[in-house]
Image (cartoon, rainbow, N blue to C red):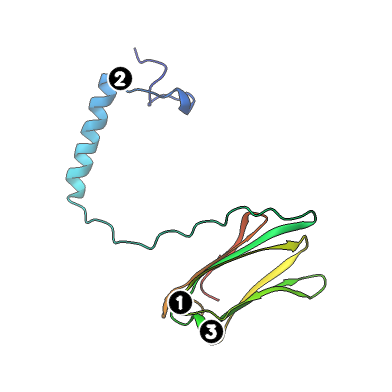
Amino acid sequence: SDPVNNYMDFSNDSCMTEFTDGQRAHMKGLWADYRKAKGPTEPPAPTKPPTVAPTIQICGEGHSEFAVDFTCDQHGEETTWDLVDVCSGEVVLEGGPYSMNEDVSVKDCVPDAKYEFTVYDEYDDGMCCRYGEGSFEVYYKQSKVKRGSMF
């Protein structure tokens, strides 16, 4: 009889702590068959480390954190952006232009409001992929609200 605390039942994950001898042999056989069918694998190509989410910034009452992370393409000098208060039309924050392949992180406290974030590219060809692997991520109140590279 199978124990209650094994990996192949329908109990809560925290209860799954062991395989029975039959389950162990079955899984090893499946893995061996899978590896034979797949053959040797190539190691993955090195990738750029992931962008770290912004750290939490303490904003005063009535204000929240806004953050944007850019990885510029080869033409960072074409990239600018702004954050506009939708109700007042006021540009609250803006940035750019940047350098070639520059990584940029901007964090600031802004009044609680509804905002529109816009990225501008002088030549309208975006940040990816013809001239590098550029992208951006926007955070408001510690939540990712927008990301992109083609616009």
Label 2 to label 1: alpha-carbon separation: 53 Å
Task: State which tag comes first along the sequence, 2 or 1.
Answer: 2
Residue corresponding to mark 2: 20
Label whose residue precedes the other's in the sequence (2 or 3): 2
Pointer 1 or 3: first along the chain:
1
The residue at which mark 1 appears reads as 73
* Left or right: where 28 falls relative to 112: left
Crowd rating for badge 1 (residues with CA inside 10 Å; few <14, some 14–19, many 20+): many
- Which one is nearer the viewer's eye here, 44 or 70? 70
Q: In this figure, which residue is indicated by the disc labeled 3? A: 78
- Residue in view at x 53 percent, y 84 percent: 78
Which amino acid, mark 3? Glu
Label 1, label 3: how far apart the Cα atoms are? 9 Å
Tell whether 100 sits left or right of 144.
left
Q: Is residue 93 or residue 122 the one in the foreground?
A: 93
Is disc 2 placed on a helix, strand or loop?
loop
Q: Of the residues shown, which amino acid type is indicated by label 1?
A: Asp
Q: Quadrant of the N terminus?
A: top left
Q: Residue at x 44, y 75 (%)?
A: 101
The residue nearer to you, when weighing 113 against 59, is 59
Within 10 angstroms of label 3, few (less than 14), some, or many (20 or more) residues?
many
Q: Is residue 78 visible?
A: yes
Whether tag 1 and tag 3 are in contact, CB under 8 A, the answer is no
Mark 2 or mark 3, whichever is nearer to me: 3
> Which tag is nearer the camera, tag 2 or tag 1?
1
Relative depth, front residue between 41 and 44: 44
List x then y, in percent, for residue 136. 54, 68
Q: Compared to 16, does 128 lie above or below?
A: below
Residue 125 appears anywhere in the view: no
The answer to whether marks 2 and 3 mark residues whose Cβ atoms lie closer than 8 Å is: no
**How far, Cα to Cα, is label 2 from label 3?**
61 Å
| Residue 98 screen position, x and y as percent | 53, 79
